[in-house]
Image: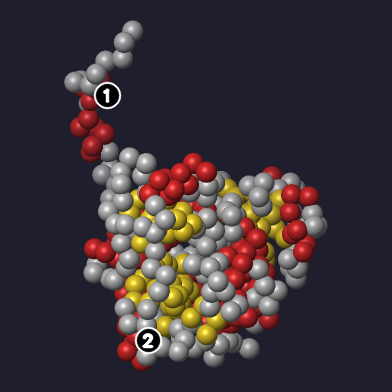
C-alpha cells in the first residue's frame, strides 16, 4: 500500500468535447488505480446532455455506450452549486432540504478537450471551492489554445514550427503544403494536410472541427513524433521519451492513439525512443521549460517533432490520455495519481484581491458623470 494523505477522492470525466469517450476511458482507469491503492473513490460523469451524475464504481466502457443518452444505469443526478447557503459543491438532487452535499476530497480531472480541459471546469471547481488537478484556469486555457501556446514558445525562444492563424482575409507567410489544426482542439481530431491556401481556407466552413478557429503550420513530412511526460509532484520529474509510430498517414492519428482495446501502452510505438543521448537531453530540458512557461501542474504530456537532429515543441496536453501513466513504466500508477491529488489538495497561489473598502465607489459620484462624453442613444 502506498502511503498518502489522500483517503477520499473524486474522479471526474466525460465532458462536452469530441474526446468525450476517451475521457470516459481515462476516468475509469484512474478510478481503478486509486481504488486499488485503498482510496475511497467516487466517480462523477459530465454527460453529453450537460448534466452531472454520480455513477457507480467499477463500470465498464460499454456501460456508457449501451444506455439512452449514454448515462449508465444507477446514475444519480448531481447539481453543482456555487455560493450556496449550505456551501458550494456537488449536491445529490432530491431528498430533504433540497439535496445532500457530496464529500469529494480532491478532484482528479480526466476531461479531454473542450471546456473540461481548457479552463472551464477548473474555473467552476475553484469557484465551488473544490481542489482539483488539471492546472489553473489560466494555465489550462493556454495549453489548449494552440495559437497562444505557440506564441508563448516563440517569445521564450523555445524551438517550434511557425504557427499562424488561418484567415480567409490574409495569405499565409510560408508556402504549402500545410498542416491545418483546430485552434482549440486536442488529440488529432480535425487535423488536415492540404497543398494550398485556398483549400485550407475552405476548411474553415466545411470542417466542423475548424469552424471555431484554425491554425496553420508548414508540413514537414521528414519530422517524426516524440512524446514525453512531466510530473510536478512530489518533485519535478521527466519520463523516458516515446516515439509513436505512424502507420501510413502524415500525422499520428486518433485511431492509432486510442481505438485499441489494449490501451495506449500497446499503441504502435518505440519505447524508449531510439534517439541520441544529446537529443534526449534536449527534449527533457525543453519539457521542463514548457511546464515552467505554462504554469501547468500534475501530470502533463508534451509532444515534440524531430528529424533526429532538430527538435520542435509541438503542443502540451494538460490532461493527457490515460494520464500518461504508460510513459512511467517503472513507477506505480497509484503513486503518480496520489502525488497529483496531494498537490491539488494544497492551496494554490491566488492573485491578491485588494478590496478598496468603497473608496472608488464614494469618489465616483453619480453615474451620469461617468456617461458624459459618450455617444447618446437616439430617442
Q: Quadrant of the C terminus?
A: top left
- SS category of the residue bearing label 2: helix
Residue visible at 29% across and 71% down in the picture: 159
**Depth check, front residue: 30 or 113:** 113
State the residue in front, 331 or 272: 272
Q: Earlier in the sequence, mark 1 or mark 2?
A: 2
Label 1 crowd bin: few (<14), some (14–19), many (20+), radius 10 Å? few
Residue 364: quarter of image = top left
Mark 2 burial class by Cα count in 10 Å: few <14, some 14-19, many 20+: some
Spatial CA span between label 1 and label 2: 61 Å
Q: Is residue 215 above or below residue 30?
A: above
Kindly tell me whether residue 253 is visible in this rendering.
yes
Is 311 on the left-hand or right-hand side of 238? Answer: left
Residue 349 shown left or right of residue 103 in the figure:
left
From the top left corner, tell me how far across and down residue 340 is, in percent: 50, 75
Residue occupying the point 36% across, 44% down: 167
Asked whether the residues under the numbered discs 1 and 2 touch, taking CB atoms below 8 Å apart as contact, a structural biologist would say: no
Say left or right for 13 vs 352. right
Q: Position of residue 172 (x, y in %)?
A: 31, 51
Q: Which residue is mark 2?
A: 280
Locate the N terminus and report the quarter of the image it occupies.
bottom right
Q: How is the image coloured?
A: secondary structure
> Could you tell me which residue is drawn at 56 percent across and 61 percent down?
111
Query: Viewer-proximal residue, 337 or 360?
Result: 337
Q: Point out residue 206 in the picture as x, y percentages from the top left corner.
A: 52, 43
- Foreground mark, 1 or 2, reads 2
Name the residue tied to disc 1. Answer: 367
Q: Is residue 350 visible?
A: no
* Above or below for 82 versus 302: above
Amino acid at each position: 500500500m502506498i502511503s498518502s494523505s489522500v483517503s477520499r477522492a473524486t474522479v471526474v470525466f466525460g465532458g462536452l468535447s469530441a474526446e468525450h469517450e476517451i475521457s470516459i476511458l481515462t476516468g475509469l482507469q484512474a478510478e481503478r488505480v486509486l481504488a486499488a491503492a485503498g482510496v475511497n473513490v467516487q466517480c462523477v460523469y459530465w454527460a453529453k446532455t450537460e448534466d452531472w451524475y454520480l455513477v457507480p464504481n467499477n463500470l465498464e466502457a460499454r456501460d456508457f455506450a449501451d444506455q439512452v443518452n449514454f448515462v449508465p444505469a444507477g446514475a444519480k443526478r448531481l447539481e453543482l452549486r456555487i455560493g450556496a447557503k449550505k456551501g458550494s459543491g456537488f449536491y445529490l438532487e432530491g431528498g430533504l432540504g433540497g439535496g445532500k452535499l457530496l464529500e469529494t476530497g480532491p478532484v482528479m480531472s480526466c476531461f479531454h478537450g473542450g471546456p473540461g480541459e481548457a479552463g472551464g471546469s477548473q474555473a467552476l471547481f475553484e469557484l465551488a471551492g473544490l481542489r482539483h488537478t488539471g492546472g489553473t484556469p489560466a494555465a489550462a486555457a493556454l495549453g489548449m489554445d494552440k495559437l497562444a501556446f505557440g506564441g508563448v514558445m516563440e517569445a521564450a525562444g523555445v524551438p517550434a514550427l511557425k504557427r499562424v492563424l488561418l484567415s480567409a482575409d490574409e495569405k499565409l507567410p510560408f508556402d504549402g503544403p500545410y498542416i491545418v489544426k483546430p485552434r482549440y482542439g486536442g488529440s488529432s481530431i480535425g487535423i488536415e494536410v492540404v497543398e494550398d491556401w485556398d483549400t485550407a481556407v475552405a476548411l474553415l466552413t466545411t470542417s466542423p472541427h475548424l469552424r471555431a478557429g484554425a491554425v496553420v503550420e508548414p508540413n514537414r513530412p521528414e519530422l517524426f513524433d516524440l512524446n514525453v511526460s512531466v510530473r510536478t509532484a512530489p518533485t519535478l520529474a521527466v519520463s523516458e521519451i516515446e516515439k509513436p509510430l505512424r502507420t501510413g498517414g502524415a500525422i499520428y492519428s486518433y485511431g492509432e492513439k486510442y481505438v485499441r482495446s489494449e490501451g495506449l501502452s500497446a499503441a504502435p510505438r518505440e519505447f524508449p525512443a531510439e534517439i541520441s543521448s544529446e537529443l534526449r537531453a534536449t527534449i527533457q530540458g525543453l519539457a521542463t521549460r514548457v511546464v515552467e512557461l505554462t504554469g501547468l501542474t500534475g501530470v502533463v504530456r508534451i509532444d515534440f517533432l524531430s528529424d533526429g537532429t532538430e527538435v520542435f515543441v509541438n503542443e502540451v496536453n494538460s490532461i493527457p490520455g490515460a494520464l500518461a501513466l504508460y510513459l512511467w513504466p517503472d513507477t506505480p500508477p497509484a503513486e503518480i495519481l496520489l502525488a497529483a491529488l496531494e498537490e491539488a489538495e494544497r492551496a494554490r497561489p491566488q492573485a491578491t484581491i485588494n478590496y478598496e473598502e468603497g473608496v472608488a465607489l464614494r469618489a465616483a459620484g453619480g453615474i451620469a458623470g461617468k456617461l458624459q462624453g459618450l455617444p447618446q442613444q437616439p430617442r
